Image: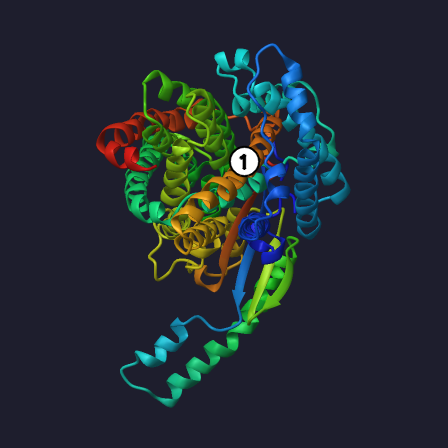
Amino acid sequence: MEKTYNEVVNHLTRVVLHLRPDPACYEMVNKADKVTPELIRDFSRAVAGRPLRVAAMMDALAAIGFEFTAHNNVIYADSQTVEAYEVKEYLLKQGFKDREFQIILEYARKWGML
Amino acid sequence: MAGVPQSSLPFIKREDTWAIIIALFLTVAITFAFMAGSMGMFKAMAVSVPSWSNDVSKVTAAMGNNIGGIITLFVFFLVAFTIAANVMGYKVKNYAVGFSVLFVISLVITALGSNKFLKDYQLETPLLALLFGMIVSNLVKLPAWFQEALRTEFYVKTGIVLMGATLPFTIIMKAGPLAMLQATIVSVVTFFSIYWAATRLFGLDPRFGATLGAGGSICGVSGSIAVGGACRAEKEHVSVAISLVVIWAVIMIAVLPWACLKLGMAPGPAGAWIGTSEFADAAGFAAAEQYNAAANLPKGDDRAVKTFTLMKVVGRDMFVGLWALMAAILSVSVWEKKKLSESERVDYGEVWRRFPKFVIGFFIASIFTTVVISMMAPKIAAGYEKEALGVIKTLRGWTFTWTFLSIGFTTRFRELTSFGWKPLAAFTIGVLINVPLGYYLSNVLFVDYWLSVK
């Protein structure tokens, strides 16, 4: 998007994609009134589905120019052009849920002032 | 690395790391030199300029007599900063040439700032450096190689860690809790005043309001950057908030020391007020040093700079991470109108990620010299404080002069973001609350504490 103002900062938008499932997956087992084989099968599907959701988010993010690195079971998707609010709107529009990703936004002075 | 978010860099490539390494190296080296009885080189490096009126030859003679010291001062910082610049990914050749020019300008400005005629007009070194830099940078486009050396944050962080070496840890322990209390009162009142005015009076986006509030209350540009990032404020909003902080901070560099002098404030409360009501570290040090110089205090009396540091660094800067975490939680839940259980997960690492790491160096330096002094016999300790810490104070003064010049050279008004009247009005409301409240807390309610800091 073309900027119509003087930018005094650079930014790095980082979408954090955990390969481990949401802790809520474990809660469905831990907090279940009755533990059944079917419950564990549901749990298994939820756990196994996580990498596929991450891959789907990576496809979507790659389409808008994000680049990827991996560290400690986490995929980092970085962009210095897309803003944090833009990528959040974009991911939600693509059908992903808030709890499937984390966004970290870092600003830095563009030149050495104050 | 220019313009790259510091927390995304490896530890060794950050400004804070190198500010700590350089300042702690100096502190330890000077301490060992004192113990070994070979302070000669460091004493020579502690270049100071005598006061003069019409006789320029007095200055040139003083500088000529210590040309070896000036060269040692230059070479030490050129080498130290250039090694850091290389690791941090600056353009090394440009940086080295730019710093050399900055050093020469700092010599000239320091000589001019020691002139009695200019001092009568309160044009001491800090204000002179700032004005000179601002006039040049707003009239002439500075060459890229010179801009590479204008590292305000790097120089001020190095100076702050050196400041830690000269500030006994016992004083930090004694005055620190009060500084935190005063900072909390002012920060909370100012932050929510700006936030309320921005969102309720002027209908601005809450993220924009929080970014403006952080700039006006927590720690200036660094506050806006930390909170703006944590709450995912738009880049334009962060740019506007920073531009407002820069303009108000520069105004306050002149206004606060002038007001302290006109109100007849003692150095302790004056420094505390500046630490409470100035917006940025570098600008605050400029204001505190300007007050110190203009108040004609005895040589070595830096109570105002000490109380400023306690208020700003210990009281305000340390807590930016907690403010960022609060903004992050509000952002994904309240402002997005979602329950916490459904909202995006907040990374509690925000607190550490946004913590200004140079503060650790400040504490280490303070603890180091305090322990060294406690292990010495009283007579030797007095000598250490006078000689070794005296040298550190002078070297700190040079890092601050490069800071003030860098502030001036980088405050280019045409490059700031234009803003409408609404953010300006919201921020100004915060200033109108912050400044009198800071005065009341520093010079009335807690005046005894600030007077007791020696």
Residue at x-position 35% and y-position 54%: B338
SS at mark 1 in the image: helix
Image-based side of B331 in relation to A15, left or right: left
Quadrant position of residue B113? top right
Q: Residue furthest left?
A: B445
Q: Position of residue B176 (x, y in %)?
A: 33, 45
Residue B374 to residue B56: above or below: below
Q: Position of residue B413 (x, y in %)?
A: 58, 23
Residue B114 to residue A82: above or below: above
The residue lying toward the viewer, choosing from B174 and B427, is B174
- The residue labelled by disc 1 is B394
The residue lying toward the viewer, choosing from B89 and A21, is B89
The residue lying toward the viewer, choosing from B146 and A83, is B146
Q: Residue furthest right?
A: B93
Q: Position of residue B429 (x, y in %)?
A: 35, 26
Q: Position of residue B427 (x, y in %)?
A: 40, 28
Disc 1: CA contacts within 10 A as few (<14), some (14-19) or many (>=20): some
Residue B313 to residue B322: above or below: above
Residue at x-position 66% and y-position 53%: A65
Q: What scheme was used to colour the molecule?
A: rainbow
Circle 1 chain = B
Q: Is residue B92 visible?
A: yes
Q: Is residue B131 visible?
A: no
Residue at x-position 51% and y-position 54%: A104
Residue A44 to residue B230: above or below: below
Residue at x-position 58% and y-position 34%: B398
User: Looking at numbered disc 1 in the image, what kind of residue is underneath it?
Assistant: Thr
Q: Quadrant of the C terminus of chain B?
A: top left
Q: What is the total number of numbered labels drawn onto the structure image?
A: 1
